[in-house]
Image (cartoon, helix red, strand yellow):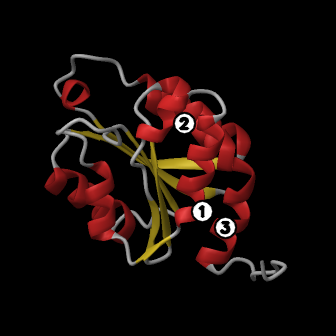
Amino acid sequence: MRWKVAILTASDRGYRGEREDTSAQVIRELIEEEINGEIIEYRVVPDEKDEIMAALIEMTDYFKADLILTTGGTGLAVRDVTPEATLEVIDRAAPGFAEAMRMISMQKTPRAMLSRAVSGIRGRTLILNLPGSPKGVSENLLAVMDQLPHALGILTGREGDHGDGA
């Protein structure tokens, strides 16, 4: 089963072409290798709430992504607004993903507590905020990778929820 995945990078410097988007490359490799995902859309936007929101809405409503992975804009800097943009467009929160990513990251660096990443659902699309660094992207995505196929299967209606009720 192939999952339709969109990648959204929020970065002023990346948008201006001043730095290579290596974090998105890490996401692409992990998604293709680990869950047989197909990247159906990739975009770099500036750290502007309205532009991030518009991209998320288009990726869900027009491109019909099963999963959107954002990278960047989850820290404490004034321009870091990816979590706020995500919260504006989701219908329901799915906090376990963000919690699991922070928990794993805290085992590696106490700075993980500075992450404001969120996760949630818009329609039948799961949206996860990832950090901006390639290392952070890899660590965070691998922390939840084994649960993505089941979560996406339930969300898209391709499989039932056979959980243990926990």
Disc 2, SS:
helix
User: Residue at the spot x=77%, y=77% of the render?
Assistant: 166
Mark 2 or mark 1: whose residue is earlier in sequence: 2
The image quadrant of residue 155 is bottom right
Q: Which mark is residue 96?
A: 1
What residue type is disc 1 on?
Answer: Gly
Identify the image quadrant of the N terminus.
bottom right
Disc 3, SS:
helix
Which of the two discs, 2 and 1, sits closer to the camera?
A: 1
Quote the CA–CA distance across marks 3 and 2. 19 Å
Graded by Cα atoms within 10 Å as few (under 14), some (14 to 19) or many (20 or more), the crowding at tag 1 reads few
The image quadrant of residue 118 is bottom left
Which residue matches tag 2? 28
Which residue matches tag 3? 151
What residue type is disc 2 on?
Answer: Arg
User: Residue at the spot x=24%, y=59% of the render?
Assistant: 53
